[in-house]
Amino acid sequence: MPDAFETTLPVPRLFYGARVRMSRLGRDRHPKYGDREGVIVGSGSPSSWRVKFDERKTIQAIHRDYLELAAQPDGASPQIAPQVAPQHGPHGAPPCS
């Protein structure tokens, strides 16, 4: 039987298009990133995400443990956000109706 210390809330998963910021561990390990926020634009290695930070031109590969979801806009939920993906045609344009 699990004790009270073993039962914790699940950590929201990161996903493509998620708005993220550096976690406490990430800020401790890489203080130069500070409180930057950005968007996940792809995956790097199996344990990292490629992030486009706001006000930066380059994309950075950041270990998943160094990232956490940033505050979601009103009405958005990190649990349903991965299911809502834009539909695009083969060249990145919206599909023809």
Image (spheres, grey):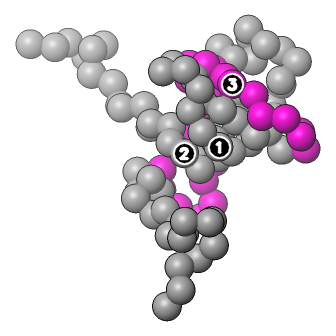
User: Can residue 51 be seen from the camera position used here?
Assistant: yes
Q: Secondary structure at mark 2?
A: loop
Circle on res. 41: 1
Region rendered in magenta = 55-78
Specify the farthest residue to the bottom: 97
Q: Which residue is mark 2?
A: 16
Residue 4, percent from left and from top: 25, 17
- Tag on residue 8? none
Which class describes the residues within 10 Å of circle 2: few (<14), some (14-19), or many (20+)?
some
Instruction: Point out the residue furthest to the left here.
Output: 1
Q: Residue at x 54, y 70 (%)?
A: 89
Q: Residue at x 55, y 20 (%)?
A: 45
Counting residues from the start of the chain, the first of labels 2 and 1 encountered is: 2
Report how far apart the C-alphas of labels 2 and 1 lie in the structure. Answer: 6 Å
Mark 3, residue position: 61
Viewer-nearest residue: 3 or 40: 40
**SS for callout 3:** strand
- Where does the image place residue 61, in percent across and percent down from the top left? 69, 25
